[in-house]
Image: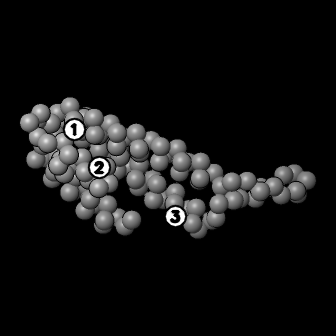
């Protein structure tokens, strides 16, 4: 996913959030910003894993090398889990703030956050 694509998608989410009146909500803004940071972290971790591989070798004082899973994989998994929880929080914020007369199934903001 390119940086431009992320920026375009972020702008689209903010436009739709504006239609729902949640774009100025403190919790929406801070949570959305945190989500953007998490996505950038995931992209960088993915690059590292792709460039360096999924394993690393460590040599100890006797020169014996052991193979381990790359630490970036653990960081990637933790960050992905946090990003998923952040999206769930964004959806809860939107659901709690949105107008109850709107149809949930046709909500474009929820669709984009759900990846539809």
Q: Nearer the viewer, residue 26 or 112?
A: 112
Q: Nearer the viewer, residue 59 or 104?
A: 104
Residue corresponding to mark 1: 94
Residue corresponding to mark 2: 113
Q: From where the camera sits, is residue 30 visible?
A: no
Q: Position of residue 57 (x, y in %)?
A: 76, 59
Whichever of callouts 2 and 1 sits on the residue coming sooner in the sequence is 1
Quarter holding the C terminus? bottom left
Q: Position of residue 100 (x, y in %)?
A: 12, 33
Contact between marks 2 and 1 (CB within 8 A): the answer is yes
**Horizontal side, residue 64 vs residue 85: left or right:** right
Is label 3 or label 1 in front? 1
Whichever of callouts 3 and 1 sits on the residue coming sooner in the sequence is 3
Residue name at image x 22 percent, y 52 percent: 13
Callout 1 environment at 10 Å: few (<14), some (14 to 19), or many (20+)?
many
Residue corresponding to mark 3: 47
**Horizontal side, residue 84 vs residue 54: left or right:** left
Contact between marks 3 and 1 (CB within 8 A): the answer is no
Q: Position of residue 102 (x, y in %)?
A: 11, 40
Residue name at image x 53 percent, y 51 percent: 76
Q: Nearer the viewer, residue 45 or 16?
A: 16
Using the rendered view, name the quadrant where residue 88 is placed. top left
C-alpha span from label 2 to label 1? 10 Å
C-alpha span from label 3 to label 1? 32 Å
Whichever of callouts 2 and 3 sits on the residue coming sooner in the sequence is 3
SS assignment at label 2 = helix
Residue name at image x 41 percent, y 44 percent: 84
**Horizontal side, residue 83 vs residue 76: left or right:** left
Residue name at image x 29 percent, y 40 percent: 90
SS assignment at label 3 = helix
């Amino acid at each position: 996913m390119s940086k431009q694509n992320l920026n375009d998608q972020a702008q689209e989410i903010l436009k739709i959030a504006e239609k729902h009146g949640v774009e100025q909500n403190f919790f929406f803004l801070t949570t959305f910003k945190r989500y953007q940071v998490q996505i950038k972290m995931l992209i960088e971790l993915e690059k590292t894993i792709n460039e360096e591989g999924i394993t690393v070798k460590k040599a100890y004082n006797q020169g014996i090398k052991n193979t381990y899973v790359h630490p970036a994989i653990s960081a990637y998994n933790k960050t992905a889990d946090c990003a998923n929880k952040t999206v769930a929080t964004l959806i809860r914020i939107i659901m709690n703030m949105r107008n109850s007369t709107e149809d949930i199934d046709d909500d474009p903001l929820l669709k984009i956050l759900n990846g539809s």
